[in-house]
Image: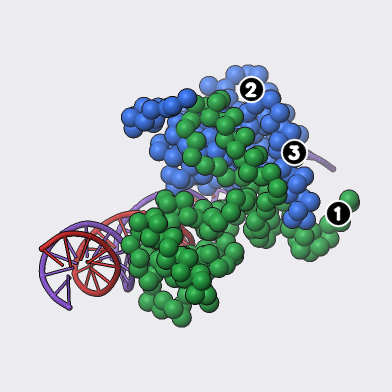
Chain colours: A blue, B green, C red, D purple
Amino acid sequence: MASNAVMEETLQVLKDHKLRVTPQRHIILAYLVSHHNHPTVETIRDALSKELPNIGASTIYNTLNTFVDHHLVVELQNGDGSTHYDYFGSPHYHAICTNCGRIVDVTYPGFSETEKSLEEKTAEISGYMISGNHMEVYGLCPECQIKLGIKKND
Amino acid sequence: MASNAVMEETLQVLKDHKLRVTPQRHIILAYLVSHHNHPTVETIRDALSKELPNIGASTIYNTLNTFVDHHLVVELQNGDGSTHYDYFGSPHYHAICTNCGRIVDVTYPGFSETEKSLEEKTAEISGYMISGNHMEVYGLCPECQIKLGIKKND
DNA sequence: CCTTACATTGGAATGGTTCTCATTTGTTAT
DNA sequence: ATAACAAATGAGAACCATTCCAATGTAAGG
């Protein structure tokens, strides 16, 4: 359940981006801000079934696409066939398990510099006018390492 | 049309990976090696309509998925709704146009070190056993900058 | 308030990808 | 060579995430 602080924060975010404040948008954004589940549309629909029992799938898609357009949210594919969404608060990237699909956020001191440097080099080499990036790292999550009986030699 | 050298090379690649050498696999791989179009399944089917007039869509999907499993090929999404494929020869990443979807390969001296460092930091932080990564940079390609009347201030 | 442009609904349509299964083909061992 | 087996192919059906559409509802500004 989203706290009052989150509701106020997300209200402001919507206004800042000149988006019409509908209950659906407000509640979906609050959900994304207060969870880091990297949910799918289905996950969101289930999670909000109490607050928004009659929401249409199209609305969730529309809302998320709007958020993506406004760079509030990023799309992620983990190979399970549906798109996952992540509220883009502070700079981070994702580690994705190739076995179970689990997605975790990763960052480290100096990551912003790495990002910036990558973007600058890309602009220079390709002539693109850069607006963003995605970095993803693939591997086996700790649980799947155990599940598959793989030992880590460190 | 793939040269003899490419056909020999790809034959060897298939054998090295212990993949059964079928004409379909051989020709598709040769196409990927000798083109850097980041093709979709449809693009490939059209391009090979002379050499493989009766190939089924499933075969192309199966073949590409097999190549992906063997890390010969990577999948790319540029937002147009279908998956693009790229033969993974030498280390590089992709710049993707947010307007027209154009994908270009990018690399620079020291890129491998950047990659390696990212993977090592990720392993340390997340506990994942890393097997690979994807980096993508988004922006407007030079053509779309012109098309949209955006001037570059450098 | 009233208006109007925009958002939401839900059901149908779309289309990329996977599935099924009968048939064909590579590969390995004889 | 040839036989035998496992694996790949092809055609179409099935699947399912996502988009489209037309009708209805609603937020925001004057």
> Which residue is pictured at 56% across the width and 53% down the height?
B77
Q: Residue furthest right?
A: B153
Q: List the residue tagged with mark 2.
A: A6
Q: In the figure, residue A7 lies in which quadrant?
A: top right
B9 or A36: which is nearer to us?
B9
Residue at 74%, 55% (x, y): give it: A126
Query: Looking at the picture, does residue A129 appear above or below residue C30?
Result: above
Q: Mark 3 or mark 2, which is nearer the start of the sequence? A: 2
- Mark 3 lies on residue: A116
Identify the amino acid type marked 3: Lys
Helix, strand or loop at mark 2? helix
Residue under mark 2: which chain is it in? Answer: A
Q: Is residue A131 visible?
A: no
Q: Which residue is mark 1?
A: B152
Pointer 1 and pointer 2: residues touching (CB < 8 Å)?
Answer: no
The residue sitting at 64% across, 22% down in the picture is A6
For label 3, the SS is: helix
Front label number (2 vs 3): 3
Q: Which circle marks residue B18 in the picture?
A: none
* Residue A114, visible in the rendered structure: yes
Rendering quarter of residue B148? bottom right
| Both marks 1 and 2 on one chain | no
Kindly identify which chain the residue marked by label 1 belongs to: B
| Residue A24 shown left or right of residue A139 in the figure | right
Residue A21 figure quarter? top right
